[in-house]
Amino acid sequence: MPEMSRIEEDLGYVRAAVARMDRSRSPAAIYFLWAAIVAAGFSLVDLAPRMVGLYWLVAGPGGFALSVWLGWRASRRAGEMDRAEGRRHMLHWFGLLAAGCLAVVPVVAGQASWYGFAATMVLLTALAYWLAGVHGDRTMLVVGALLGAGYGVIVLLPGPVWTITGILIGAAMAAAGWSAWRQRAAEAR
Amino acid sequence: MPPKRGEPPVGAAEAIPGREVLDGLDKLLEHRVRLAIAVLLSRADALSFSRLRELLGETDGNLGANLRRLEDAGYLAVTKEFLDRKPISWYALTAAGRAALASHVRALERITRAAAVAPARSEHSTGGDR
């Protein structure tokens, strides 16, 4: 039946276009931004512990706002306007920000230490990256797994583990950013 | 029981979807590029010309001609702006375009269902399973 085979071919063409559209990529700039924020923020725990709270108070919400703007700018440059997708990303990462704020409560109430709070934040961030990788950009799975391993190192090992973990995670994010940038450049050619 | 004279054999009616099934199709969206444009635009608020070209792999001329036909039919709305000093055309599906796509997709579903049922009935009537 020629009509049916033509319809099937047409639907295959449409399906392929939709699959190309669904390939979710985060802009490389967001990876580089968080690579720098995390590497500096973690190192501060070993080098200048008093600055840690203030640093994350500014870098957390500031990095979030900057990421939203970078994502919006990247999607416009890519030629795609999708408010629903933007809202989904924002809700996902806002969840992490809100969890971070709530994790301060036990410390303020004297039921947990700042060290415990920081370790919990690493674990929450690992989970947020892992879930982002499961539902979208696969490169985030690697960052999530590294953050999970970093949590184990921080909790179990003594020494300047925060600096080492921060640098490792920062390097992983920078590598993910580099990979996203190269992928985008290859597609543009 | 063999079919009466002048009647099509059992299963033949389903093998080729009836005219009423095909009538549900939207003439404009029967073209695969226009159908793909409408489907892609139904999944976002707006897409630029270059993004559509990237996703569909069509030439500027072919894509432009198909976009114009959809625009002329009132299925698409176009807005133009400058981004980094470069002109950019944003295409969005209108309410009429969404309605046309929904009805076209429903017709396609009816056709594929009819085509899926036809071979099974045809096999059954000719003892294909035995």
Image (spheres, rainbow, N blue to C red):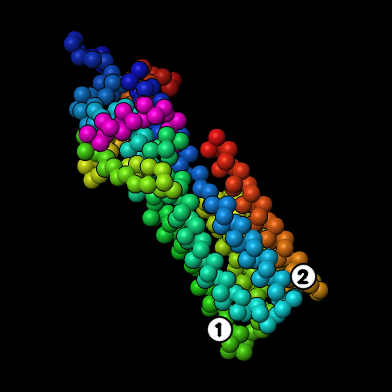
Q: Percent from the top left, x then y, of residue A173?
A: 64, 57
- Name the image quarter holding the C terminus of chain A: top right
Q: Residue furthest front?
A: B85
Of labels 1 and 2, the one closer to you: 2
Which region is colored magenta? B55-72
Where is mark 1, residue-wise?
Answer: A105
Q: Position of residue A20 (x, y in %)?
A: 48, 39
* Image location of residue B126, percent across then percent down: 36, 17
Q: Earlier in the sequence, mark 1 or mark 2?
A: 1
Quadrant location of the N terminus of chain A in the rendered image: top left
- Name which quarter of the figure residue A107 lies in: bottom right
Q: What's the CA distance linking mark 1 and mark 2?
A: 25 Å
- Magenta: main secondary structure equals helix
Residue drawn where x is 33% and y is 20% of the image:
A3
The verdict on a common chain for dots 1 and 2 is yes
Q: Is the C-beta separation of discs 1 and 2 under 8 Å? A: no
Q: Is residue B1 visible?
A: yes
Chain letter behind tag 2: A
Residue farthest along the top direction in this orientation: B5
**Residue A161 marker:** 2
Q: Secondary structure at mark 1?
A: helix
In the displayed structure image, the side of residue A86 where residue A121 appears, left or right: right
Q: Residues within 10 Å of mark 2 (few under 14, many from 20)?
A: many
Q: Is residue A141 magenta?
A: no
Please indicate whether residue A104 sits to the left or right of residue B62 in the image: right
The amino acid marked with disc number 1 is: Val
What kind of element bears circle 2? helix
The answer to whether A21 is drawn above or below residue A141 in the figure is: above
